Image: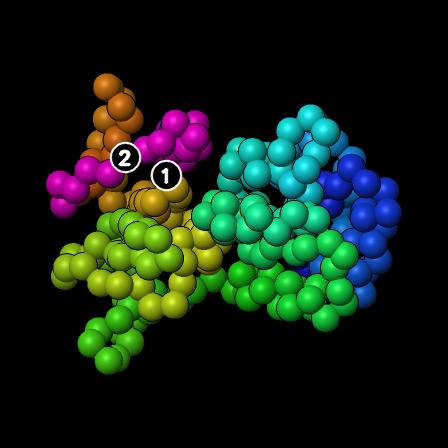
Amino acid sequence: MIRVAILEDEQLARESIVQMVSKYPELKLVGVFASPREFLRRLTEFDVAFVDIKLPSESGINIAKKINKIGIVFVTAYEEYAAQAFEIGAIDYLVKPVREERFKLCVERILQAYSRPLLKLPVRDGKDVLMLDFEKLFYIEAFGKKCVVMTLDGEYEVYHWGISELERRLPKNFLRVHKSYICNLNKVKRLIRLPNMQIELENGYVIPVSRMYQRVVKSSLFV
């Protein structure tokens, strides 16, 4: 069961999304919010949020940038923010009024994103797909829609998955530390704090930690 929240300031739009969500037993609606304050307070209670972009106090894009480990589906009357939404890892982008068949496709994308964790990481090996054991991985770096993984045996391009999907489907010891990096915490040798936070891995690689992720990195390493 995937826990769902809705952040939408327009009553009719809220009711429409609630009605569509209720038709899918795989989704459990756990919160409906008209403003960001209560929504942000209760982030741990849900897995996916339907978020309006044009909110009175703050844009949905800015709110999504503050959130880790929550899948975002933007619901908006404006088409021009789609590229920006997908750059920050949105699962989907729905334009109002949302048709039933389009919402069904959105649910399929949510279910795919939250299906069971990957058992191994598929990477490209010429024309073949090689399945890598997670203990061999040091970090994953995103280059646009393409992701590259650094391993004990060299560098590989990840097959099919983008960084936001990987963040949701990798084992718990893999942590997003930057918009372009996921780190294997089991391979961390040193946390470099100054002048800018970085992580040094056991093989000598150093990757950046962005300000947005510093708190979660510290809490994950210093449990």
Q: Residue at x 50, y 45 (%)?
A: 84
SS of the residue at dot 2?
A: strand
User: Measured along the vertical axis of the image, is residue 71 above or below residue 132?
Assistant: above
Classify 10 Å Cα crowding around label 2: few (below 14), some (14-19), many (20 and above): some
Is residue 66 something one can see in this rendering? yes
Classify 10 Å Cα crowding around label 1: few (below 14), some (14-19), many (20 and above): many
Foreground of the two, 18 or 139: 18
Please identify the quarter of the rendering in which residue 40 is found. Answer: top right
Q: Is 47 positioned to the left or the right of 90 in the image?
A: right
Q: Residue at x 86, y 42 (%)?
A: 11
Q: Is 151 positioned to the left or the right of 215 in the image?
A: left
Contact (CB < 8 A) between labels 2 and 1? yes
Query: Label 2 amino acid?
Result: Pro
Image location (x, y in percent) of residue 56: 72, 29
Q: Is 2 positioned to the left or the right of 210 in the image?
A: right
Image location (x, y in percent) of residue 110: 60, 61
Foreground of the two, 91 or 10: 10
Query: Label 1 amino acid?
Result: Val
Residue under pointer 1:
177
Image location (x, y in percent) of residue 206: 19, 38
Residues at marks 2 and 1, CA–CA distance in whole angstroms? 7 Å
Instruction: Tell me the magenta residue range.
Output: 203-222
